[in-house]
Amino acid sequence: MTEAAFAALLESNAEDLYDNAPCGYVSTLLDGTIVKINATLRGWLGYDDEELVGRRRFPDLLTVGGRVYYETHFAPLLHMQGSLGGVALELRAADGTRLPVLLTSVVKTGPDVRLIRTTVFDASDRRAYEEELLRARQKAERERDRAQELARTLQRTLLPPTLAEVPGVEVDAYYHPASLDQVGGDFYDLFPLSGGAWGFFLGDVSGKGADAAVVTSLARYTLRAAAVHETEPVGVLNHLNTVLTGTSPRFLTVLCGRIRPTAEGASVVLANGGHTPPVLIRADGTASLLHLPDGQLVGMLPNARFSAAEVHLEPGDTLLLYTDGVTEARIDGNTRYSEEALCDELSGLAPAGAPAVIEAVTRLLTRLGAGVEDDTALLALGIPVSAGRSR
Amino acid sequence: MCPVDVVRRNNVVLTGNETGPAVVLAHGFGCDQNLWRGVVPALAEQCRVVLFDHTGCGRSDVSAWSAERYSTLDAYAGDVLDICRELGLRDVVLVGHSVSAMVAVLAAAEEPDRFAGLVLLTPSPCYVDDDGYRGGFSREDIDELLVALESNYLGWSAVMAPVIVDNPDRPELAEELRNSFCRTDPEIARVFARATFLSDNREDLGKVTVPTLVVQCAVDAIAPPEVGRFTHERIAGSRLVTLDAIGHCPQLSAPEATAAAILDFVREL
């Protein structure tokens, strides 16, 4: 190419630069009426100049959904901030085909008139790719919903639908899942035994997810079945330990008990399988950790030793069993909530019945918020003050 | 349970003449209370002007939003009533733009004694065409809009959202963000769009017993004049004003005429 020819091409006039630019140009009045449009955009749309200028509004060239978007978002924003960029919409050509575009607009203010100048980029390829991404995201969202639903369903099957009623004893329970995606390993139950007694347990399987859920399920039915023929909670834990040891790399901590209503309240025998100490909230307003004789983790050693203690609940007393999701909650950097803090929290509350204690800890969990990194199970057994139970 | 802090939830802003009649301005689908900025100065001279953002929009408390609650217009009407009660407003003139016109209809049907009058700005009781009724849209059109919403987040970024929410005492942070007036969490926008464009409130128009002014634009792609006329005809004793304006937001494109129509109505009550 000669230098002169190159210069001529480079110095093409402004009109040519405008009309044959590699993007669409359109100028409209503030109400959208088209006053100028370049050849590139006319070509994309398949309209003549006279069909558009002064006759059509730019939003009329959009798809119907796009027009609503234009009126509710695009136009108000342009009015308020004078410019707007990168908006993805679709134009409808004369032959009905759709052209995905990216729009960028500025409001140009003259002495008496204001115009909207808009550049239009063909975004067909980009939009196809974005739709792929959108579809992938929607698929991921659906799968996540399904996984969460599955986790919820599984979690429900690991908890009793209702707790048995124990005459003269108020019971309440709560399960706080830390994650929607994963089923946790905490569990509890309360069920009738023969001879005017009720069995109960609350525990925590190490780890999370499907593997932990399998052990949780196994632990639950083993505990319930063992409680039928083993009269003492320690015997129940021995049985569970035998079943679990060697079958799974997982272990668990659990409190296993038997409650028997009496004339003055209830007598509770509690066996400890390496679990955090329960809180005893007395009628006189004090709350203390009930330190049970040491007991080892369940499912770790073939000859693990467990022991039990007995405690009497009187009118106004409430016993709270919990898993360490609450006491291990992160409260500030590396500091964690503690058993003592939980005890302090509840001492201000005493005397309180089982529902009030559960409600207080539920509120506490809300307050601890995202600091609660693990599931928390709560089970409270209390003797109502008015329960002067007579035989 | 703590009572809901309505003022914070809906970013309620009070301005104007404290002794004047209370005029509550309810924005429509798309942006937030900033949309009223063109009419507020004129109204404020004579009226007590109450601005707010619908829950989930603008600088409302997004944590108060849930898809279940806000999937019907009743929830938005309930919020408007909450605001009126919280501020102890009586004889309220409620101005509802676009979808909020129907929110106003629902609120006035629920608690007519609270309101002196309604101004329905570019209202549509039903956007989707139905047997013998022309709302202007088909179900497919609305699905197309939902797609347009999905592809346009207008500067929305989940990372930036907490910056705005957590700094209510530094509003300039929000101002600096482009498109902040129309920034909405895409999930919230989708639920609001569905509640807006798939609602059918034609039956509710007959329940309005307070004086009502219907204001429409001569050309409006979203609420065409025939829809405004339908609304007017179904509300007994209502008045219809057609502004010589184009578009769906006359408070932006014709702020003087819009404010004048509202003020004329307020004065006559």
Image (cartoon, coloured by chain):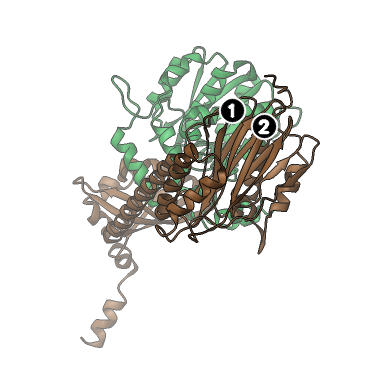
Chain colours: A brown, B green
Image spot of residue A386 (x, y percent)? 73, 23
- The vertical placement of B89 against A327, above or below, is above
Horizontal and vertical percent for residue A190? 54, 35
Question: Given the image, what chain letter belongs to the residue carrying mark 2?
Answer: A
Residue drawn at (38%, 55%), measured in percent from left and top?
A: A103
Packing grade of label 1 (10 A; few <14, some 14-19, many >=20) is some
On screen, residue B163 above or below B40: below
First in sequence, mark 2 or 1: give its number.
1
Q: Which residue is mark 2?
A: A266
The residue drawn where x is 47% and y is 33% is A161
Whether pointer 2 and pointer 1 mark residues with C-beta atoms closer than 8 Å, the reply is: yes
Q: Is residue A100 above or below residue B191?
A: below
Amino acid type indicated by mark 2: Ala
Q: Do the residues marked 2 and 1 share a common chain?
A: yes
The image's mark for residue A166 is 1
Q: Is residue A130 visible?
A: yes
A160 or A139, nearer to the observer:
A160
Q: Image check: A214 left or right of A342?
A: left
Q: Chain of mark 1?
A: A
Front position in the image: A198 or A231: A231
| Dot 1: element | loop
Direction from residue B97 to residue A49 in the image, left or right = left
